[in-house]
Image (spheres, rainbow, N blue to C red):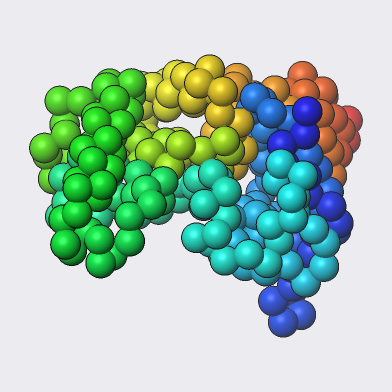
Amino acid sequence: MKLLSVEHLSKSFGGLTAVNDVSFSVDTGMIKGIIGPNGAGKTTLFNLIAGALSPDTGTVHFADKPIHGLPQHRIAERRIARTFQNIKLFPHMTVLENVIAGRHTRTKAGFIAGMLSLPHTLSEETKAVAASRDILDLLGIAALADKEAGSLPFGRQRVVEFARALALDPELILLDEPAAGLNNHETDEIAAIIRRIRDLGITVLIIEHDMSLIMEISDSILVLSSGKQIAEGPPSEIQRNREVINVYLGAEDA
């Protein structure tokens, strides 16, 4: 069943077309990879899906409902979470506090109720803390709960960002180059975490430059070049695609 459907999506900045008539879908429970050289339009595509940008043309549907043009917080409320290539944690807050911050998108208490410490607000806060601790335990970083997030090694910060995204209780998670800046051991850990996320029933859409990682974990891969999609299919098919080899890998015809 299709969870995300992108139809004829385009976005230009001045005279530069960053995303050019891109169409694809993501089925529930799959890991969909997006690859392409620098400047291919991958992050712009993510920004269009996540609400950071509005498309010039085209549509984005999530669970059969249009989301194109909605602001980011409204899209997050629809249970779409996102991580970033450049980690965006609250560095002076603890790991647990960072995750709880993500959980607050699922709570109902307003600002005034929170200030007054009303009983239902305290109950929600207790549940948010418990749920956040469960997520830290799931990802193997429960021992870091009281550590200041900015003091952690880069690889650990990446896992904390995953935890904060999971705190939103998403149906779909967008991962923007999660292996960027990681060593081989950390990349293997990220691959295991992404599979764990999928096993929880969460659908994954991932941009990644690490070809070994993307080929290993993806069920299907979309390839972009200069804003256009040039191929789509399972990893084995993408690896053999001559246009992908020529355009993305820079190989020449034999």
Q: Left or right: where does residue 245 sit relative to residue 87?
A: right
Direction bottom: furthest residue: 14
Most foreground residue, 211 or 163: 163
State the image coordinates of residue 124 (x, y, percent, origin top left): 28, 43
State the image coordinates of residue 25 (x, y, percent, origin top left): 78, 39
Q: Left or right: where does residue 246 sit relative to residue 44?
A: right
Most foreground residue, 253 or 248: 248
Position of residue 247 relative to residue 137, above or below, is below
Q: Residue at x 15, y 25 (%)?
A: 143
Q: Residue at x 35, y 44 (%)?
A: 103
Q: Is residue 248 visible in the rendered structure shown here? A: no
Q: Residue at x 53, y 17 (%)?
A: 199
The quadrant holding residue 212 is top right
Location of the C terminus (image quadrant): top right
Q: Is residue 134 visible in the rendered structure shown here? A: yes
Q: Left or right: where does residue 64 sit relative to residue 105?
A: right
